[in-house]
Image (spheres, rainbow, N blue to C red):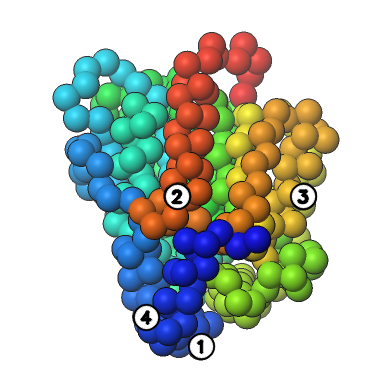
Amino acid sequence: MLDIQLRKLLEHGRESGVPDMADVPMPATREIYTALLTATDLPVADVDIDDHRIDGPGGALPLRLYRPRGRSGRRGAALYLHGGGFCVGRPQDYDGLCSQLCLEADCIVVQVDYRLAPEHPFPAAIDDAWAALQWLSQHAESIGADTGRLIVAGDSAGANLAAVMALMARDRGGPALRQQTLVYPVVTAAPGQFDSYRTHGEGYTLTTRLMARFNDAYLGDAQVPADWRAAPLMADTHSGLPPALVQVAGFDPLHDEGLAYAEALASAGTPVSLVTYPGLAHGFISMGGAVTAARLAVSQVASAWREAFAAPPDPTPA
């Protein structure tokens, strides 16, 4: 059964005439996305928020840092990659979520304003995310973080990028990661191949049509590329990866591929915690200010981070 608070949000959106993001120009889609997140995200926590710029593969690359206020000592750091179908979203849209995670997990959170499609199609977002992860690994001490306690995380398209970062870090000899958090991840390059696209592909927050639009914009002419970086479920092996927290929603077209990725990790021997929020829909991690169950999901992420940061380092090579 759909969560009653979420159902009311969806009804309010329909009554207010919010247009389908699949049917409006990309600038309007981005404005609608920002407005939706602003209306439902958690309030911004009392943490320090600073903007930085680093050298990226496409020029100056903006980063947004969240640090606990008035606390000394080095702490773990999480690179959080925002969702939005590779086409929409900004770090500012996630200030509530990331500041709350910073506060609750007592860690530093770094967001990267990666380049968006269609202006910058695949693999621009991956290149930017990798540059941000490299910077975080190399400059952790300068921002009060512990180089040995790093996490990658993200939701939806951002979870795709986080999963890819974990695979790339493994294959390229580091940086070592304590954990990966994947919230309703995109792990294939062919929207619609799972049953949940047919059962939950319309009427909720993410539609099959919108996902297809984002996918076309991101991949361009390469609709189903052989490159696993577009579809981490296609990676040759999912072994040797950091432990994963995978969260999925019951009313989400991405539900089944999230399950498939968790199964691929577990089958390869990678520790994985799979949590289903049966009454929620896609986007719930940014609804903590309006939906109680979504707030619980945020706290679960923070708890998983605290546990990962507190664990002894893995003696095996990355």
Residue that label 3 marks? 260
Amino acid under disc 3:
Ala
Residue that label 2 marks? 292
Q: Which mark is residue 27?
A: 4
- Residue at the far right: name it: 267
**Residue at 26% in and 33% down:** 67
Examine the rendered structure and indicate whether residue 188 appears above or below residue 56: below
- Residue situated in front as seen by the camera: 173 or 275: 275
Residue that label 1 marks? 23
Can residue 168 be seen? no
**Residue at 42% in and 76% down:** 12
Q: Taking 35 as reference, is 1 left or right?
A: right
* Mark 4 or 1, closer to the camera: 1
The quarter of the image holding the N terminus is bottom right
Q: Taking 298 as reference, is 44 left or right?
A: left
Q: CA distance from mark 3 to mark 2?
A: 27 Å
